Image (cartoon, rainbow, N blue to C red):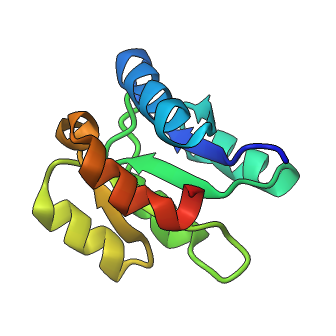
Amino acid sequence: MAGKKVLSVGQCDFDHGSIESRLRGLFGASVVPVDGADEAKALLGREKFDLVLVNRVFDADGGSGLSLIEALKGPSQPPLMLVSNFPEAQAQAVAAGAVSGFGKSALGDLKAMQSLLAPYLG
């Protein structure tokens, strides 16, 4: 059986590497990076993903992760999760249709990451 597949939107190269390493280590998941909303929408139209991680502010162009979540939400989309350390941004993302996300500072907490992501990648 193939591993789970995650789309990561708007992360810088360093953060993408950290996220990819953690998800591969915990779940054997592959993580596909894209820079922004247009790439994400196009890829979601062509490929199946088990989870979409959306940075609060896209590194490449400053785009809004919350705007992308609002544009993508719906029953035909995989779960959407905001990557942000700001609790108010997490609350806004959940209100916009995302599932509870995490901040980059949580990547070092294996137990928390396992618990949060297992429903989608376990």
Q: Position of residue 122 (x, y in %)?
A: 56, 57
Q: Nearer the viewer, residue 28 or 50?
A: 28
Residue nearest the viewer, comparing 26 with 58: 26
Residue at image position (38%, 52%) is 114
Q: Quadrant of residue 57?
A: top left
Q: Residue furthest left?
A: 87
Observer able to see residue 60: no
Residue under the image location 33 percent in, 49 percent down: 113
Taking depth in this image into account, of 50 and 70 the one nearest to the observer is 50
Question: Which one is nearer the viewer's eye here, 77 or 120?
Answer: 120
Q: Residue at x 13, y 66 (%)?
A: 88
> Would you place residue 48 above or below residue 21 in this image?
below
What percent of the width, then of the height, locates residue 115? 35, 60
Q: How many marks?
A: 0
Q: Is residue 121 left or right of residue 18?
A: right
| For residue 41, above or below residue 27 | below
From this view, report whether residue 51 is shown above or below residue 9. Answer: below
Q: Is residue 81 left or right of residue 44?
A: left
**Whole-percent x, y for residue 36 in the image:** 54, 39
In the rendered image, residue 37, in percent from the top left (x then y), is placed at: 57, 47
Question: Which residue is at 13% across, 54% downward?
Answer: 86
Residue 64 seen in the figure: yes
Depicted 94 relative to depicted 112: above or below? below
Instruction: Give the quadrant of residue 22.
Output: top left
